[in-house]
């Protein structure tokens, strides 16, 4: 173990770089605790020339919502738990590991999950609680690095570059982060460590739950080679099929393929995939990550098919998204509508907004036109709206300030204030009330944010439901 005297011996630079705080019982000494073996590994590592150019950890909580429910309610421990609405129409947000051997997983309908595992316990989600636990986890990560990039409530990149002197080699870093999260929250986290973000993300996904996977920098390409191409971040079922058609099944196949042919077949995306397959990923961990989209969607109690029925849901989603944009002082240059048919086919349309806006009324009007283009595919079981291409309001609105009627802006700001003071949806517009046989229902609205640019979001069911909210 390090004594505090030894800790003080660390250079002034290291101490400045790592801002230790006493969060939730994770003391500076606990974070620095080392076993003798780890200390010897550390000495070997720093003596030789085995340092990685970057050390990136990807941390992903195991079955996050379900694990929080099992933590808070001991009666649920060891049992299959499905977090989701108590409605046959709803979808599973997270299945506990006890439910997974039965084939239950996130984004599956509750009805299907209950058919596969009839004795599962359904627990309605408590997002406020998850948000609180998430904040605690992120503060633990902050103890390890000043550069933490959250991807969702339960997932983050942590840039550990240059921290070997404090925490030891990558494997020791991973163990220490896992211990600190468990100590602070009682929950398990899976960690992948690699020299790039992309490989760290793949590594954490390979061994869950409670996993720790370290990919040595020098072995990156060899480690990636046998993995299926769908393991690459951003390769959805459609891209997977295109790669298979080119005879590329593994990441190794992709890495060895001719980049010029790939570029001809797949455009810029082909070059990007070739780079990733070869372990090249210049992306840095960004502490203040730009959000690409903010959205809201809901699986409905009753299918909708008429424009009027769909508009009720678009209006509500537009207002929620608008309130969140205002709250973050962002405005959007694009809006996208997503409709899922009763046969689970996803349709989406998007439009540019000029000037950029955060007004619910403008988002609603644009979304109504987009929905009209898809009405023939109905009936629908899910309606979603997202604002994308977001920018800070201060950046470019001076001239647009009066482009929208100020009255509209004041009305929406007042609605925000009342709703945040007295609870969400306190004040609804008269037209939000149930009408035309459209039942708002009790399924929770999934408000999500995404950091993937729209062009890189594969248009597949899996990615829209799995990647966007990061529910698992
Ligand atoms: Mg997770």
Image: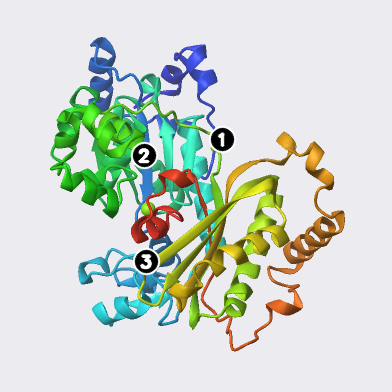
> Is any atom of residue 122 visible in this view?
yes
Q: Which mark is residue 58?
A: 2
Query: Judging from the image, what secondary structure is the residue with disc 2 in?
Result: strand
> Going from the N terminus, do you reach mark 3 or mark 1 first?
3
Secondary element under disc 3, as helix, strand or loop, is loop
Q: Is residue 449 left or right of residue 100?
A: right
Image-based side of 221 in relation to 197, left or right: left
Crowd class of label 2 (few under 14; some 14 to 19; many from 20; radius 10 Å): many
Q: Please name the residue shown 42% across and 34% down the image.
A: 158
Query: Which of disc 1 and disc 2 is earlier in sequence?
Result: 2
**Residue 196: image x %, image y %?**
33, 29
Above or below residue 461? Residue 149 is above
Q: Nearer the viewer, residue 417 or 47?
A: 417
Read off the residue under disc 1: 288
Task: State the residue at coordinates (66%, 51%).
Answer: 325
Q: Is residue 278 visible?
A: no
Per the model, the C-alpha gap separating discs 2 and 1 is 16 Å
Work out whether 420 lies above or below 30.
Answer: below
- Give the CA separation, mark 2 to mark 3: 23 Å
Residue 135: image x %, image y %?
A: 54, 48
Mark 3: few/some/many CA within 10 Å (<14, 14-19, 20+):
many
Identify the residue at image location x=20%, y=67%: 101
Q: Residues within 10 Å of mark 1 (few under 14, many from 20)?
A: few
Number of the front mark, 3 or 1: 3
Across and down, in percent, residue 155 comes to 42, 47
Vertical comparison of 389 with 260: above or below: below
* Image coords of residue 227 (percent x, y): 17, 42
Please identify the quadrant where the C terminus is shown: bottom left
Q: Which mark is residue 107?
A: 3
Choose mark 2 or mark 1, whichever is in front. Answer: 1
Of residues 102 and 385, the one nearer the viewer is 385
Of mark 2 and mark 3, the one earlier in the sequence is 2
């Amino acid at each position: 173990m390090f004594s505090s005297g030894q800790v003080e011996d660390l250079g002034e630079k290291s101490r400045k770089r790592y801002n230790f705080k006493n969060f939730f019982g994770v003391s500076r000494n606990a974070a620095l605790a080392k076993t003798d073996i780890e200390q010897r590994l550390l000495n070997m590592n720093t003596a030789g020339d085995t340092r990685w150019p970057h050390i990136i950890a990807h941390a992903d909580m195991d079955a996050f919502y379900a694990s929080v429910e099992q933590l808070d309610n001991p009666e649920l421990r060891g049992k299959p738990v499905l977090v989701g609405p108590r409605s046959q129409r709803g979808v599973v947000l997270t299945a506990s590991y006890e439910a997974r051997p039965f084939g239950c997983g996130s984004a599956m309908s509750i009805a299907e999950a209950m058919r596969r595992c009839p004795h599962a316990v359904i627990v309605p989600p408590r997002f406020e609680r998850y948000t609180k636990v998430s904040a605690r986890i992120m503060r633990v990560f902050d103890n390890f690095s000043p550069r933490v990039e959250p991807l969702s409530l339960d997932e983050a990149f942590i840039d550990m570059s240059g921290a070997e002197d404090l925490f030891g080699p990558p494997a020791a870093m991973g163990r220490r982060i896992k211990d600190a999260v468990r100590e602070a929250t009682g929950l398990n986290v899976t960690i992948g460590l690699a020299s790039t973000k992309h490989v760290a993300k793949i590594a954490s996904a390979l061994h869950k739950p409670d996993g720790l996977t370290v990919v040595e920098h020098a072995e990156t390409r060899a480690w990636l080679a046998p993995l299926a191409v769908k393991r690459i971040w951003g390769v959805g079922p459609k891209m997977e099929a295109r790669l298979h058609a080119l005879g590329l099944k593994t990441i190794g196949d992709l890495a060895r393929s001719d980049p010029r042919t790939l570029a001809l077949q797949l455009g810029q995306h082909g070059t990007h995939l070739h780079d990733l397959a070869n372990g090249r990923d210049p992306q840095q961990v960004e502490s203040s990550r730009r959000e690409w989209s903010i959205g809201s969607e809901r699986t409905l109690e009753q299918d909708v098919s008429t424009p009027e029925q769909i508009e009720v849901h678009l209006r509500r989603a537009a207002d929620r998204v608008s309130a969140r944009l205002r709250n973050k002082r962002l405005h959007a240059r694009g809006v996208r509508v997503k409709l899922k048919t009763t046969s689970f086919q996803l349709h989406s349309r998007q439009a540019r907004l000029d000037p950029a806006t955060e007004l619910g009324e403008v988002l609603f009007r644009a979304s109504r036109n987009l929905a009209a283009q898809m009405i023939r595919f109905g009936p629908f079981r899910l309606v979603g709206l997202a604002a994308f291409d977001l920018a800070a309001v201060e950046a470019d609105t001076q001239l647009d300030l009066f482009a929208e009627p100020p009255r509209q802006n004041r009305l929406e700001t007042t609605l925000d204030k009342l709703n945040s003071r007295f609870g969400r949806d306190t004040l609804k517009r008269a037209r939000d009330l149930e009408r035309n046989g459209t039942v708002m229902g009790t399924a929770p609205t999934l408000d999500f944010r995404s950091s993937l640019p729209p062009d890189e979001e594969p248009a597949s069911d899996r990615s829209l439901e799995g990647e966007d909210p990061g529910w698992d």
